[in-house]
Image (cartoon, grey):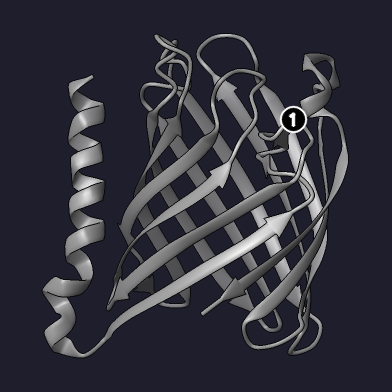
């Protein structure tokens, strides 16, 4: 528990202090986003019980540093109503490689008493451009996993191809593992289209290899729209 509290404090402090601390360098940037989707799919699994999603967030960047907050509705077939994420990190470059090292706190509103769903995740991502394409990979470690029954790791490789200034295609393959049971593989493929500089659409197919774990692990197609300003 002390580790979770320490990481949460670090995430909140970084998110709140990153911009103001470096504002004197005139590179502080604040952006907002709101959107909706036909389903909230997180690593191949529906977090809204196959129902629509509404979400929004705010991001602060200054130089190599970033922080932000994001919220969404969820449906776990219990009293939990919403998820809020608090995150912060640093995004340096090493030659042609873009890195992203961060920490993210997942919080849940009105979760059942004693469920203790909140958890902290450590993230390390890297990507490299290859002409009109980008290849990336990510490693996500949770020292005290969802429900706090064990640790977990998520590994992912992904790629994106920009066909035009407005149209892009992307795909990802990931593996979710736990110290206990429940490991599964997930993948997605889809396309994004920028209607305007601020409004984007995404149409994506998601699937996992563990349909036996329930309908939320089934294959699905999700349409989403997001506005940034």
Position of residue 178 in the picture relative to residue 19 (left or right): right
Q: Where does the image place residue 36, in percent across and percent down from the top left?
A: 69, 58
Position of residue 21 in the picture relative to residue 30 (left or right): left
Position of residue 196 in the picture relative to residue 57 (left or right): right
Q: Quadrant of residue 118?
A: top left
Residue denoted by label 1: 49
Q: Quadrant of the N terminus?
A: top left
Q: Where does the image place residue 192, in percent across and percent down from the top left?
A: 77, 71
- At a point 46% along the width and 25% down the height, the residue shown is 110
Task: Give above or below for 183 relative to 4.
Answer: above
- At a point 62% along the width and 73% down the height, the residue shown is 227
Residue 92 visible from this viewpoint: no
Q: Where does the image place residue 167, in percent across and percent down from the top left?
A: 80, 80
Label 1 packing within 10 angstroms: few (<14), some (14-19), many (20+) = some
Q: Nearer the viewer, residue 135 or 117?
A: 117
Q: Where does the image place residue 119, in percent across and percent down from the top left?
A: 39, 29
- At a point 67% along the width and 56% down the height, the residue shown is 158
Q: How many marks?
A: 1
Residue 59 visible from this viewpoint: yes
Task: Give above or below for 190 relative to 168.
Answer: above
């Amino acid at each position: 528990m002390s580790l979770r509290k320490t990481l949460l404090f670090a995430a909140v402090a970084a998110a709140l202090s990153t911009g103001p601390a470096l504002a004197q360098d005139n590179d502080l940037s604040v952006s907002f986003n709101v959107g909706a989707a036909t389903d909230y799919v997180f690593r191949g699994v529906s977090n809204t019980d196959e129902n629509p999603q509404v979400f929004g967030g705010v991001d602060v960047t200054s130089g190599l540093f970033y922080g932000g907050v994001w919220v969404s509705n969820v449906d776990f077939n219990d009293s939990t109503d919403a998820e809020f994420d608090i995150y912060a990190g640093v995004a340096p470059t090493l030659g042609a490689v873009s890195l992203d090292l961060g920490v993210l706190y997942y919080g849940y509103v009105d979760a059942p008493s004693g469920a203790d769903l909140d958890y902290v995740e450590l993230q390390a991502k890297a990507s490299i451009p290859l002409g009109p394409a980008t290849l990336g990979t990510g490693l996500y470690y949770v020292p005290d996993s969802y429900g706090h029954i064990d640790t977990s790791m998520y590994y992912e490789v992904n790629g994106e191809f920009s066909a035009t200034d407005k149209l892009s295609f992307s795909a990802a393959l990931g593996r979710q593992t736990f110290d206990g049971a429940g490991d599964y593989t997930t993948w997605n493929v889809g396309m994004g289209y920028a209607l305007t500089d601020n409004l984007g659409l995404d149409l994506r197919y998601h699937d996992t290899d563990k349909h036996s774990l329930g309908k939320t692990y089934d294959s699905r197609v999700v349409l989403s729209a997001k506005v940034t300003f």
